[in-house]
Amino acid sequence: MSKAGNQDWLESYLDSLETQRKLAAHTIVNYRRDLAELSALASRADGLGEAFSLDALNHFHIRKFAAQLHAQGQSGASIARKLSSWRGFYTWLAKQTALPANPVEGVKAPRRGKPLPKALSADDAVRLVAQANPRKDANAAGELCNRAMFELLYSSGLRISELVQLDLRYAREHGHESSGWIDFDAAEVRVTGKGGKMRQVPVGSAALQALTAWIGVRPALVKLDPHPLFLTERGSRMSARLVQMRIKAHARALDIPADVHPHMLRHSFASHVLQSSGDLRAVQEMLGHASIAATQIYTALDFQRLAKVYDAAHPRAKKK
């Protein structure tokens, strides 16, 4: 069929969307744009610039078109929308012709790239965990608890759930068994992560000092439960939600320009250790990732950092 014939089909289909399905005008505009792109791709399908009949396109052509759109930089979401438009057209065309099969069925858009984890710069991370809250009305015991929690999150890359489940020391009594605790002699924290898997992670000297300072005032807050390492002012075990609120408030008080949350310190830990050591396997073990693939995303963060250094430093990379 000629290019004009292809256009006749497209116009008939668009007319059916408007008159039979009563789609909104802006929706029709979107369909028209997506189908025009299909027609343009079909006209180049043989590589000779000859019009390719839309009913002659097959599954492999559509897959090729999707790959071409992806190579042009179009997002997975955009390509998925276009495939949906094309699929609807071929469902309609099958009712008008002896189309053997819908060539778009089974064709999927390229996977959407996962967003990179957000990590603080090393300077901001250190400032967040080391600098005292400038507010004069800050509770002294609460500030020591905050400092110990924040230092430990950054020092050892713990999940927030692992942090709040820590006990002062290992205990197994009265129906309670510790799932995590600090081993000061070994300078390690032992935690139970996903899948019930226990791991040991080093604790840095700054975090150990902050923990020691907190433990010095902790007895005054102990009430019914003597086990939790981190306590609220009421003497109950610290909750994940309260840690989130405290770290956000602390970051705002220090004017750190980021929406800081506890997991950001875990990302920062992984990124900064990887930048310094390059040891992906060690970072995997300390984070408690079952698969190395989960840890490899931090190499992209490291590449971003190197790219910024290059752009800022190389005389032929600087933008005019």
Image (cartoon, grey):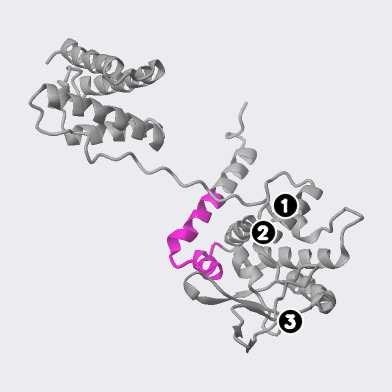
Q: Residue 245's quadrant in the figure?
A: bottom right
Judged left or right of residue 144, residue 175 is: left
Asked whether 303 or 204 is in front, the reply is: 204
Give the amino acid at mark 1: Lys
Q: Distance between the residues labelled 3 and 1?
A: 28 Å
Q: In which quarter of the image is residue 111?
A: top left
Q: Residue furthest right?
A: 136
Q: On screen, 213 above or below 76?
A: below
Q: In which quarter of the image is the C terminus?
A: top right
> Where is residue 263 drawn, in percent x and y?
61, 57
Q: Residue 241's mark?
A: 2
Whether 180 is drawn above or below 127: the answer is below
Nearest-to-viewer mark from 3 and 1: 3
Kind of residue indicated by mark 3 = Pro
Residue 254 in sight = no
The residue at 47%/72% (across/down) is: 195
> What's under tag 2, amino acid-wise?
Arg
The secondary structure that dominates the magenta segment is helix
- Judged from the image, the secondary structure of the residue bearing numbered disc 2 is helix
> What residue appears at the point 51 percent right and 66 percent down from the top-left corner?
284
Q: In this view, does 229 lie above or below 32?
A: below
Residue placed under numbered mark 1 in the picture: 248
> Is residue 302 part of the magenta span, yes or no?
yes
Q: Which residue lies furthest to the bottom in this view?
A: 173
Highlighted range, magenta: 278-303
